[in-house]
Image: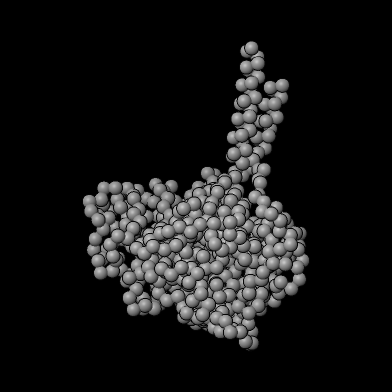
């Protein structure tokens, strides 16, 4: 009997362990009090932390995050850059999910399928990211896939962001009335204010970030711009930044003394502690392209502290790029290239996808403009259309055949007609290869992001894009990423292979532009209908509100670590019981 039970359990556990691992997180999203710039204010924390915890996982792991919304308004979390294969249901944006009401739970479950790299999550609704609620996602290589560089001695995550003393609710009210955000009140690094490097600029008593390192060691720094609307230049006094990865793609390894990181972008650097440790060193994040008479008051400064340091950081901050040199940042962006010889999440090299040899099947030229009055309200547009989020999410409307919620009529180019507010969606073709050109007619740098995909950044330049611009495209090693910047009065071109079915959000990452309507969705339908079914814990709203019953927390019966532990305990207890009976 014992042998039979053991064989049964062994078969069961072997089958379970053959699956990709599950990791579980239990988060409470709530307001907490913090003073990042020396003034007490309400911020959004996760389990009392600001910034929130880091999801540290490995390629192909299944991630289960139970979220309790303790805010006073509905919210969603979105997983910036995670390509949830065939599973739009976990995307956490208004087009795919009903908001999680205040005091409710909702459980996200997704797989980091065939991905590596540095990403982050954040609240996607109601300007909430301006109050925090963000954290990092680190996806490590599987052991069988080597890194394209020596294993670092440590892994450090830094969140850089512009910050406003006004609450996210005040900020969203102001932009609804046409009041611009203006220059930020400060720049935070890991949710903390600037180091007291200058009495005339920084008042005492402000907490700052200290990064502890050891002389001679090399660390991987994952830097995320999680801010509202400000491009930031990142640099470390007397240290080089060796760029190795951005948003899931290993890059050609190049040294930079500083790098412009735009809203929503993530980078990995290797930094070797090759100084003598005679003092600490400044870590700096300063605003770029901000029209302000005194931007020195909004500089983020942290401290790099060697274990053998002999004193505090001193002297002037390392110089930023010349603000008048408008070509510096673009030239720098063009220099970032894909490492086509490096392996990533799969055994084949990440660069084996030869995108430059694929025929483009559709082209979209998306024009943006500054906020304007449309039907009496301040709105932003893409190609003359300001997106109106319906009360029933697009994905649910499609699944339940709710008519007239959205239109598959987003234009390929700017139409000769007045701007309008509409729920217009791009009709994507499954496995089409699409060229998208972002034409920035605004006066500020804009960032754009596509959920569910990595796209190839193949070109950017000042002026108007024309078909002749294709002659400048990088068709060999343009980096694959999920967020790209578009400079004012300039264009950026991307190529994307629509092989991931679902309804995917294409948006401005700058919160003011996004909040006022600068987004759309791409509807990609697989004729074989291979998408995952509606989750059992789906929240219903809008036209589907009658389907909503009392809240039910999703139960997962996968071979989770907790279940395996329980089974082992049961088995051990069973054996002990049998042995006890035998000895008696």
Name which residue lies at 26% across and 58% down. 313
In this view, 319 is above or below 111: below
Left or right: where 49 falls relative to 307: right
Quadrant into which the C terminus falls: top right
Q: Residue at x 34, y 54 (%)?
A: 210
Number of numbered markers:
0
Question: Which quadrant of the view contains residue 164?
Answer: bottom left
Where residue 445 sits in the image (x, y, percent)? Answer: 47, 75
Front residue (pair 17, 394): 394
Residue 34 visible to an observer of this rendering? yes
In this rendering, is residue 488 above or below 45?
A: below
**Residue 231 visible somewhere in the drawing:** no
Q: Give the camera-side residue of 83 and 466.
A: 83
Percent position (x, y) of residue 522? Answer: 65, 69
Residue 191 image point, x, y percent = 41, 59
Query: Residue lying furthest top in this view?
Result: 584
Residue at screen point 48% across, 68% down: 168
Q: The N terminus is located in which quarter?
A: top right
* 436, above or below 343, in the image: below
Image location of residue 85, percent across then percent down? 64, 56
**Left or right of residue 51: residue 391:** right
The residue lying at 49 percent from left, 76 percent from top is 174
Q: From the viewer's perspective, is 86 left or right of 69?
A: right
Q: How is the image coloured?
A: one colour
């Amino acid at each position: 009997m014992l042998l039979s039970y053991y064989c049964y359990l062994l078969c069961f556990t072997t089958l379970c362990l053959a699956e990709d691992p599950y990791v579980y997180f239990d988060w409470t999203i709530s307001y907490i009090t913090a003073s990042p710039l020396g003034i007490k204010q309400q911020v959004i924390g996760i389990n009392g932390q600001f910034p929130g915890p880091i999801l540290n996982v490995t390629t192909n792991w299944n991630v289960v995050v139970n979220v309790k919304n303790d805010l006073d308004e509905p919210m969603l979390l979105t997983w910036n850059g995670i390509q949830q294969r065939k599973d739009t249901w976990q995307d956490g944006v208004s087009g795919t999910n009903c908001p999680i009401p205040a005091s409710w739970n909702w459980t996200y479950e997704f797989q980091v399928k065939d991905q590596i790299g540095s990403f982050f999550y954040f609240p996607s609704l109601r300007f909430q990211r301006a109050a925090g609620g963000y954290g990092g996602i680190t996806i490590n290589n599987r052991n069988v896939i080597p890194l394209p560089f020596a294993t670092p001695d440590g892994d450090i995550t830094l969140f850089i962001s512009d910050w406003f003393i006004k609450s996210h609710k005040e900020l969203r009210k102001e932009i609804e009335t046409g009041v611009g955000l203006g220059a930020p009140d400060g720049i935070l690094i890991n949710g903390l204010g600037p180091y007291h490097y200058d009495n005339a600029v920084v008042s005492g008593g402000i907490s700052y970030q200290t990064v502890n390192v050891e002389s001679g060691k090399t660390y991987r720094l994952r830097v995320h711009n999680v801010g509202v609307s400000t491009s930031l230049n990142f640099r470390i006094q007397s240290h080089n930044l060796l760029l190795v990865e951005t948003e899931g793609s290993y890059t050609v390894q190049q040294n930079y003394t500083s790098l412009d990181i735009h809203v929503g972008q993530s980078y990995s650097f290797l930094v070797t502690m090759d100084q003598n440790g005679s003092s600490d060193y400044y870590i700096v994040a300063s605003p770029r392209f901000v029209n302000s008479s005194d931007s020195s008051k909004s500089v983020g400064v942290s401290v790099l502290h060697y274990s053998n340091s002999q004193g505090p950081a001193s002297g002037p901050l390392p110089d930023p790029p010349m603000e008048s040199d408008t070509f510096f940042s673009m030239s720098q962006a063009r220099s970032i290239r894909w490492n086509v010889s490096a392996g990533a999440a799969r055994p084949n090299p990440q660069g084996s996808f030869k995108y430059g040899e694929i025929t483009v099947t559709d082209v979209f030229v998306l024009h943006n403009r500054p906020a304007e009055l449309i039907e009496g309200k301040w709105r932003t547009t893409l190609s003359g259309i300001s997106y109106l989020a319906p009360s029933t999410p697009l994905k649910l409307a499609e699944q339940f055949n709710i008519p007239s919620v959205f239109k598959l009529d987003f234009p390929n180019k700017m139409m000769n007609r007045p701007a309008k507010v509409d729920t217009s969606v791009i009709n994507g073709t499954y496995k089409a290869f699409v060229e998208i050109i972002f034409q920035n007619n605004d006066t500020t740098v804009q960032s754009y992001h596509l959920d569910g995909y990595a796209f190839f950044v193949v070109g950017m330049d000042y002026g108007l894009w024309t078909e002749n611009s294709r002659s400048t495209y990088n068709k060999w090693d343009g980096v694959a990423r999920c967020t790209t910047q578009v400079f004012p009065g300039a264009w950026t071109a991307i190529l994307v292979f629509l092989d991931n079915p679902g309804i995917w959000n294409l948006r401005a990452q700058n919160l003011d532009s996004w909040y006022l309507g600068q987004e759309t969705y791409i509807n990609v339908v697989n004729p074989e209908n291979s998408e995952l079914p509606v989750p059992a814990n789906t929240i219903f709203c809008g036209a589907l509100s009658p389907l909503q019953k009392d809240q039910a927390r999703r139960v997962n019966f996968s071979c989770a670590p907790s279940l395996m532990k329980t089974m082992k305990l049961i088995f051990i207890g069973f054996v002990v019981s049998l042995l006890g009976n035998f000895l008696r």
